[in-house]
Amino acid sequence: MARTPTIGGNWKMNLDFDEAMELASGLRNRLGSHRGAESIIFPSFPYLRPVSQRLRDSAIAVGAQDLHTEASGAFTSGVTGTMIRSVGCTHVLIGHSERRTVFGDDDALVAKKLSVALTAGLIPVLCIGETLSEKEANQTFSVLARQLDTALRAHTPEALSTLICAYEPVWAIGTGLTATPEQAQEVHAWVRSHVRGLLGPTFAEQLRIQYGGSVKPANAAGLMSQPDIDGALVGGASLKAESFAEIVRAAR
Ligand code: PGA
């Protein structure tokens, strides 16, 4: 079956307010009515509301980079899924490798964040991926299995129907090293077959799996032409409207 490609732009902790608004406008001009692939951008929390407003009625969706697991209360600096929804967002990143490695989000916390995102009615983009040392120790598939099992096993296929998965080898993020299209395809096919075992063939066939890690205009088409690669999660190259737009246009 045909899966609509989905391209995420993870702005991470970059851009001042004026730059963020300029980027949003540049994306609106280039992709505001683009229908071939889905685009979602993930600005920093303070910009979610104004960026959502600037992109209102466009083809570009807006999401948050993280959320807190509690619904309210004394959790200084926490941001809930309901808050994120209330400022015009539809999506949220869950378990990005920088959350896992820099902030210490473990598999159990990632699983809880996925649950609260679903409860809040947000579309989760669940990020998984192995580090360089795990890859070198031939642990890629066992790490991915653990990350997928912990996050997904509590849920039915119906509850997860909006899920997007992002495979991001940690050694390829921000390093300029990309998996080759063939290497990435091998892992994506493995992820889909593992998900088939967890949630069934219909779910696995429909699941969109983005590739992430140094995706740029020059390598996007090659990666996304692979049968199990359904888009990209883009960091650095999403900070320029033209390069992000080129990656979205490269998705067929
Ligand atoms: P990168 O980041 O494109 O800068 O490697 C990807 C990501 O972290 O999602």
Image (spheres, helix red, strand yellow):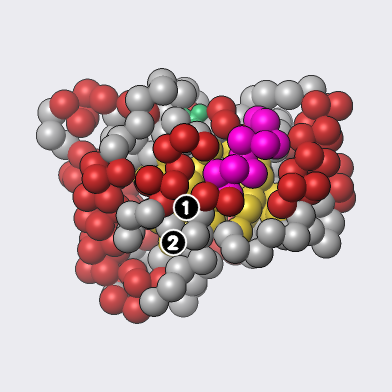
Look at the magenta stretch and give its main secondary structure: helix
119, 204: nearer the viewer: 204
Q: Is residue 133 above or below residue 126?
A: above
Going by the image, does 67 lie left or right of 77?
A: left
Q: Position of residue 167 (x, y in %)?
A: 37, 45
Q: Secondary structure at mark 2?
A: strand
Is 110 magenta? The answer is no
Residue depicted at 29% across the width and 29% down the height: 131
Q: Position of residue 73 (x, y in %)?
A: 72, 43
Going by the image, does 178 lie left or right of 135?
A: right
Q: Position of residue 130 (x, y in %)?
A: 29, 35
The quarter of the image holding the N terminus is bottom left
Q: How many marks?
A: 2
Residue depicted at 65% across the width and 30% down the height: 239
Q: Is residue 171 above or below residue 90?
A: above
Label 1 with label 2: CB-CB less than 8 Å: yes
Q: Is residue 120 visible?
A: no
Question: Which amino acid lies under the numbered mark 2 shown in the image of this protein?
Answer: Arg
Q: Position of residue 160 (x, y in %)?
A: 47, 68
Q: Is residue 1 above or below residue 20?
A: below
Question: Which amino acid lies under the numbered mark 1 shown in the image of this protein?
Answer: Gly
142, 238: nearer the viewer: 238
Q: Secondary structure at mark 1?
A: strand
Residue behind mark 2: 208
Give the extent of the magenta segment.
Answer: 239-248
Going by the image, does 172 lie left or right of 113?
A: left
Q: Which numbered disc, 1 or 2, marks the residue that appears first in the sequence? A: 2
